[in-house]
Image: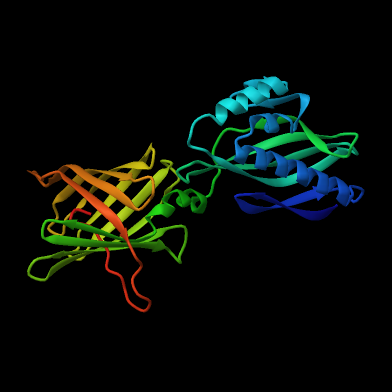
Amino acid sequence: MKTKFISLLAGFTLIMPVWCDDAADSANLAALQKSAKAYVEAFNKGDAEALAKTYLPDGEITRADGTVIAGREEIQAFYEDELAGDAKSSVALEADSLRFISPGVAVENGTLHITDAAGKVSSHDYTSIQVKQEDGSWLTASVRGQAGDKALPAEKMSALDWIIGDWIIQMNDSETKLSFEWSKLGPYIEGTASLARPGGITDHVSMRIGWDNARKGFVSWSFDGSGGFVRSDWTDAGNLTWLMRTQGVTADGEINQYNQFCEVESSRQSFKWTIRDHTIGDEVQDDMVLTAVKRPPAPKGTTANTNTSKSE
């Protein structure tokens, strides 16, 4: 046995380690690569007919729930339904193994990575049977998908790529500046905020955002300059909107809890940030609706202040 590598393009490049018998020649591997690339390109173009043609006429798809889609006509209809709508997803294939069980039949095991229009990544294992044709090309006889999302935290975090950079919030006589960047320590986003008020009073907040694989959602922590902190559990509400349920403790030891709603504008150049149901101890706080606008990066060699109100 020996290892060969095939690179598959799909929005980004994935390396496919292929385990095959020494007898399997490079022509077969190149043809299988071409077939996989055709599938990826057809999906990313939204071409259901071309996707169906990557299967044998009597090919089939077995979904994770056991549903079977059989024949090119049903497969094309399945992909037409999957690709319907304005918000397009893109895919990438990463094959973990490829085994030739005969000169013209190969079993492929791998992972299908799906990135939706909002940048959210999900990854699913699959097993496929590939059959060689008379002209040397390969078509898919069957694909079986497996339930569960195995995308790594670093891949999940790509859905928050829009937040990276510097932002400003202006409200009445105060100004809040926010800055976010990818952490050098792992799959996290680090953030800072400064709220400047009249009289030279400035509140500072530091933040970290990560992925909670237990609850399958983002989680963030915020620490203010006085010693208070909050934790926020994020829920993806779709359409670049997140609900954050937040609870923590003020520097005085009072329970601080509220709900936040972050609605990102389609251009990713602004977002609306709403704070509701806010209580500190037994005292009810006013609701707030703020708009953050992206600003140019701070000049090189300077440190950007960042934004969040005291409640963040």
Observer-nearest of 176 and 193: 176
Question: Is 117 on the left or on the right of 173, as rendered?
Answer: right
Observer-nearest of 215 and 155: 155
Q: Position of residue 239 (x, y in %)?
A: 39, 38
Residue sitting at x 66%, y 38%: 42
Q: How many marks?
A: 0
Q: Position of residue 165 (x, y in %)?
A: 37, 61
Residue sitting at x 61%, y 39%: 45
Question: Is 114 on the left or on the right of 256, as rendered?
Answer: right
Residue sitting at x 45%, y 43%: 118
Observer-nearest of 103 and 37: 37
Question: Is 110 on the left or on the right of 252, as rendered?
Answer: right
Q: Quadrant of residue 182?
A: bottom left
Identify the image quadrant of the C terminus: bottom left
Q: Does 229 appear above or below 35? A: below
| Residue 70 in view (yes/no) | no
Q: Position of residue 62 (x, y in %)?
A: 66, 26
